[in-house]
Image (cartoon, rainbow, N blue to C red):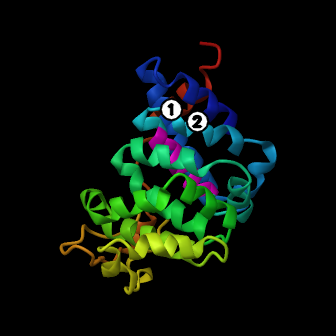
Amino acid sequence: MIEKYLKVLQKVDHDSKNARHLEIITDAMCSVFRAQKDLPASVPGLGHLHKIVPAMKRAHPEMQASLLRVLNELCEADVCIRTLASFDSVSYIKMAMAGAERSAMAAAMEMISKMYEGNQSALVAQALRCELPQYLLSQLKAPLDTIEHAAAAKAHCVKGLKAMTKDLTHGMTVSDILDATDWWKTYKEQRHDLFITQSTTAGYLTGPTAGVAGYLMAAPVTAASATAPPEEDEPQQRSRLADLLGDDDD
């Protein structure tokens, strides 16, 4: 599936069919990784992360959004986070966050919190080199208010920044950057875990837009909305699967 995904990424600009394939295969990969918790750990050993991450630098909002969603699922595995720390990955991730469709920002912030709670000092060093803390602070101030699941996205953003400050080598530098920012004081004393729900929906987090700057609000998710997949008739599913897997010779 990842090999197919990489091929679709290369052809996504050529026609609408390939753009549709990107959407289908992204949803499929996120669902598979979420259902099979051990699969993400096998991805780094196959060399796929070294291909997926550099693809993020390409200025293509749909493709960058797809890559952020997929990488968010992969970051459930500690070995994936360690692999990201072993090469220059954070600068590419920042490029994708800056260029991707806004709908991917919730997943991107969740990925950031996973990465930096993995206690990889090399990732913090990379973040400082590409000024990721400053970028995250700028997103926290206003732009995240404009996306769906804004409260949860902000919560993950804050968790990621706080995790950076705990690094023994570079944490003090990150703390100095945060403390020099006026609006950071609004967030740093809050408990943000209350605004993040466990959901089976790939890359989507629960929480409405905050009504007051610096304060987060969240509404409960019903069991039905958290677990029920969208209904779709079987012929349409078969048609999509045939389109997805049958175009290698086109």
Residue 138 in picture, x, y percent from top left: 34, 60
User: Which residue is tagged 1?
Assistant: 58
Front residue of this view, candidates 113 and 162: 162
Q: State if disc 1 and disc 2 touch (CB < 8 Å).
A: yes
Q: Which residue lies furthest to the left in this view?
A: 211
The reply, left or right, for residue 250 in relation to residue 150 is: right
Magenta-highlighted residues: 64-74
Residue 234 in sight here? no
Specify the amino acid type for callout 1: Arg
| Number of dots carrying numbers | 2
Mark 2 burial class by Cα count in 10 Å: few <14, some 14-19, many 20+ = many
Q: In which quarter of the image is residue 224?
A: bottom left
- Three-letter code, disc 2: Ala
Residue 229 sits in which quadrant?
bottom left
Q: Is residue 69 magenta?
A: yes
Relative to 220, residue 135 above or below: above
